[in-house]
Image (cartoon, helix red, strand yellow):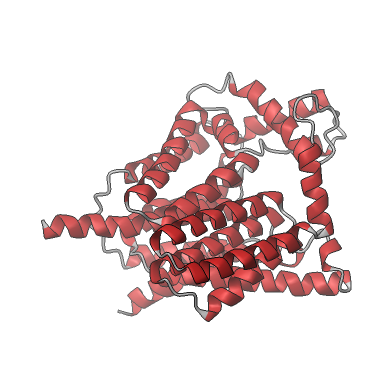
């Protein structure tokens, strides 16, 4: 009994520490504690969900790639990819509980509040002009933005399930949008708009509570108006609108730099083959491209910029097989979400799809843990349904 309780505590500890992964490597210790406690109290489930093998194959492919392709830095790359062990562990030994998702929401709320207080102090009140609001928790701005979007998705899903907006919804939803204004991350803001529009459409179709819907839309429009009038946010979206996507030669901002990364990746994936180049050679090939297009003094070369696109990065690292597996996993997320009328899975698909277009999120621990854990965890709810249906028949 105590071991089962420890497993539940370690699970919550793992989720809570996702946004604080770099602080004393706390999330790595959380993963280790979780895996050990799960395996010590292992009770294998009757797991028969047909698409689960895609996640397992993806896990095995990366293990193969790290050992046999990335031989020069294999130990380092094995260490970086340890969070992938969450895929089989979660799928085979964990049960779905809604409380885990709520814990994640409050963890992100705490991380956001810490960043807000830090930003206020460092900027002396000029919070919308401060360029590194997440410095104190050592988390990149784009990842906190994505975590906020998923937290919004969880809150929206709660409202859709219960048709009741509780006090925490009225507090947390505006708070998260306010934090997005401070973070000024274009991808996060675009995703938040898309999932909110989808929420409104589903709510109108499912619940039809016009009074709540009108009030929510008015609040959302006010929040969006506020966000887009913030100086850095307005500047960033102005850059997006005025960006030359065809004949760009000045790679000085985030958009144009990504264009260069995509161009260099596209040039190299032609020879990636079935298993790709591995992490180290992919990095070297991209650096060579940055050096030839710019110089050895460019920030892209010095900081070893990745593909800034998860799909291109996957082909570079894992080849055609890795790309097909990743696309299949995306397809399964959408398929299961639509088939089971699960808005949260569709929200999650939207988040992963848009984020994957602008970031190689699976090469960093925040993104790797987020994907490995929640992709497996969100599938568990439908695993239980599948098994219960089989038993009832």
Total count of labels? 0
Question: Where is residue 3, by image quadrant?
Answer: bottom left
Q: Nearer the viewer, residue 179 or 315?
A: 179
> Which quadrant holds the N terminus?
bottom left
Task: Tell which residue pokes out farthest to the left in this image.
Answer: 393
In this picture, residue 36 sits left or right of residue 110 = left
Q: Is residue 381 above or below residue 114?
A: above
Task: Tell which residue pokes out farthest to the top in this image.
Answer: 271
Q: Position of residue 359 (x, y in %)?
A: 64, 43
Q: Nearer the viewer, residue 125 or 55?
A: 125
In this picture, residue 42 sits left or right of residue 199 = left
Whether residue 341 is visible to the viewer of this picture, yes or no, is yes
Q: Position of residue 15 (x, y in %)?
A: 51, 66
Image point 39% across, 67% down: which residue? 161
> Which quadrant holds the C terminus?
bottom left
In this picture, residue 72 sits left or right of residue 43 = right
Q: Is residue 142 above or below residue 305?
A: below
Image point 58% across, 42% down: which residue? 356
């Amino acid at each position: 009994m105590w071991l089962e309780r420890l497993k539940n505590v370690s699970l919550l500890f793992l989720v809570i520490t996702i946004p604080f992964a770099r602080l004393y490597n706390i999330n790595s210790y959380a993963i280790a504690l979780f895996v050990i406690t799960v395996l010590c109290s292992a009770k294998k489930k009757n797991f028969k969900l047909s698409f689960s093998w895609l996640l397992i194959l993806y896990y095995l492919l990366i293990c193969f790639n790290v050992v046999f392709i990335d031989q020069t830095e294999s130990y380092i790359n094995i260490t970086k990819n340890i969070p992938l062990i969450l895929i089989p562990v979660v799928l085979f030994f964990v049960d779905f509980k809604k409380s885990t998702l709520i814990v994640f929401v409050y963890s992100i709320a705490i991380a956001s509040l810490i960043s807000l207080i830090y930003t206020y102090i460092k900027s002396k009140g000029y919070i919308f002009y401060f360029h590194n609001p997440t410095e104190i928790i050592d988390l990149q701005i784009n990842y906190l933005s994505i975590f906020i979007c998923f937290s919004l998705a969880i809150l929206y899903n709660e409202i859709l399930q219960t048709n009741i907006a509780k006090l925490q919804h009225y507090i947390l939803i505006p708070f998260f949008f306010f934090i997005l204004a401070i973070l000024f991350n274009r991808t996060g803001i675009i995703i938040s708009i898309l999932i909110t529009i989808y929420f409104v459409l589903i709510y109108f179709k499912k619940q039809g509570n016009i009074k709540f819907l009108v009030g929510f839309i008015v609040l959302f429009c006010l929040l969006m108006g506020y966000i887009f009038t913030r100086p850095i946010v307005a500047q960033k979206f102005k850059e997006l609108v005025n960006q030359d996507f065809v004949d760009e030669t000045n790679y000085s901002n985030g958009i144009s730099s990504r264009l260069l990364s995509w161009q260099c990746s596209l040039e190299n994936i032609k020879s990636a083959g079935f298993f790709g180049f591995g992490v180290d050679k992919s990095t070297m090939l991209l650096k060579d491209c940055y050096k030839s297009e710019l110089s050895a003094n460019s920030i892209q070369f010095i900081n070893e910029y990745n593909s800034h696109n998860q799909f291109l990065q996957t082909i570079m690292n894992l080849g055609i097989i890795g790309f097909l597996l990743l696309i299949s996993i995306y397809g399964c997320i959408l398929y299961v979400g639509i088939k089971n009328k699960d808005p949260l899975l569709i929200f999650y698909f939207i988040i992963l799809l848009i984020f994957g277009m602008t970031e190689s999120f699976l090469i960093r621990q925040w993104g790797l843990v987020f994907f490995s854990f929640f992709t497996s965890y969100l599938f568990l709810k439908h695993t239980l349904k599948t098994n219960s249906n089989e038993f009832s028949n």
